[in-house]
Image (spheres, helix red, strand yellow):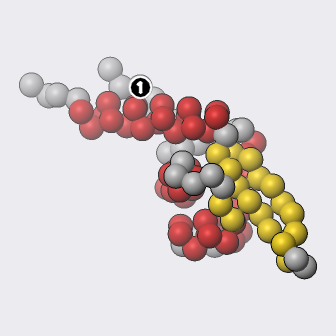
Amino acid sequence: MFKSLDPLLHSQLRLAVMSLLMNVEQAEFVWIKEKTGATAGNLSVQLDKLSKAKYLEINKKFKGKYPQTLCKITKTGEKAFAEYVKSLKNYIDIKTD
């Protein structure tokens, strides 16, 4: 039986962001933008969607005179990502015989 895939994580950019954040304590917006190849506008929109779902936290501060946006995955986000991967593996591992 196929479990439904989390539609929030089934977007290429949001999945890429979550994959990156699973492997670091936190990450700067600019770093995520560089790693994903996303535009600043599109990345901002997708981060906002993940933040509203409580999958990540966004903290804005200043580093010297420059604004800095830091993103961190939450426990809810970690759980959702793990469930997504588990469901995806179920799709891949289905035996047809």
Q: Is residue 4 left or right of residue 61?
A: left
Crowd rating for badge 1 (residues with CA inside 10 Å; few <14, some 14–19, many 20+): few
Q: Residue at 40% across / 31% down in the picture?
A: 87
Q: Amino acid at mark 1?
A: Lys
Q: How many callouts does the rendering have? A: 1
Q: Quadrant where the N terminus lies?
A: top left
- x and y percentages locating residue 83 in the rendered image: 48, 31
Q: Residue furthest bottom?
A: 65
Q: Is residue 24 above or below residue 40?
A: above
Q: Is residue 19 left or right of residue 47?
A: left
- Residue 46 is at least partly visible in this image: no
Q: Quadrant of residue 91?
A: top left
- x and y percentages locating residue 8 in the rendered image: 58, 42
Q: Residue furthest right?
A: 65
Q: Residue at 57% across / 54% down in the picture?
A: 24
Badge 1 marks a residue whose secondary structure is loop
Q: Residue furthest top?
A: 1
Q: Quadrant of residue 76?
A: top right
Q: Is residue 37 above or below residue 26?
A: below
- x and y percentages locating residue 7 in the rendered image: 54, 39
Q: Residue at 90% across / 79% down in the picture?
A: 65
- Residue 73 is at least partly visible in this image: yes
Q: Residue at 54% across / 44% down in the picture?
A: 9
The residue at which mark 1 appears reads as: 3
Q: Quadrant where the C terminus lies?
A: top left
Q: Is residue 15 left or right of residue 49?
A: left
- x and y percentages locating residue 3 in the rendered image: 41, 25
